[in-house]
Amino acid sequence: NTICFTTKGYGHGAGMSQYGASFMAKEGKTYKEILNHYYTGIQLKKWEKIDSFAE
């Protein structure tokens, strides 16, 4: 008796692939291009200093 499993790819299939992002960076893509590739429709905003966190 034989059981054969066929899979495709690695990981959970959601979000950013660390290998894909690394490859894109090595190809000269910017962090903005990489983020927009994996997370379509996002808006990147400048992080403002936070003096305290709400509890």
Image (cartoon, grey):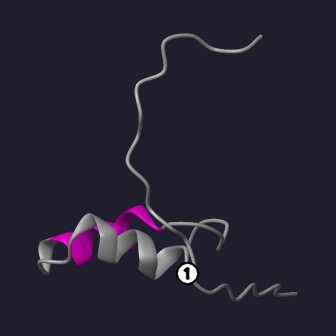
Please tell me how crowded label 1 is: few (under 14), some (14-19), or many (20+) other residues with Cα within 10 Å. few
50 w.r.t. 25: above or below: above
Question: Which residue is label 1 attached to?
Answer: 40
Quadrant of the image containing the C terminus: top right
- What secondary structure is found at the residue carrying circle 1? loop
The type of residue carrying mark 1 is Thr
Quadrant of the image containing the N terminus: bottom right
The residue sitting at 48% across, 21% down in the picture is 50
Q: Residue furthest right?
A: 1
Instruction: Tell me where residue 36 appears, x and y as whole percent.
Output: 44, 76
Is 23 placed left or right of 36 in the picture?
A: left
The residue sitting at 55% across, 71% down in the picture is 42
The residue sitting at 72% across, 14% down in the picture is 54
Instruction: Tell me where residue 40 appears, x and y as whole percent.
Output: 55, 81
Instruction: Tell me where residue 10 appears, x and y as whole percent.
Output: 56, 72
Q: Tell which of 10 and 3 is nearer to you.
A: 10
> What range is drawn magenta here?
17-25
Q: Tell which of 55 and 38 is nearer to you.
A: 55
Is 49 placed left or right of 43 in the picture?
A: left
Instruction: Tell me where residue 31 appears, x and y as whole percent.
Output: 28, 65
18 w.r.t. 55: above or below: below
Q: Is residue 23 magenta?
A: yes
State whether the magenta stretch is mostly helix, strand or loop: helix
Q: Is residue 53 magenta?
A: no
| Number of numbered markers | 1
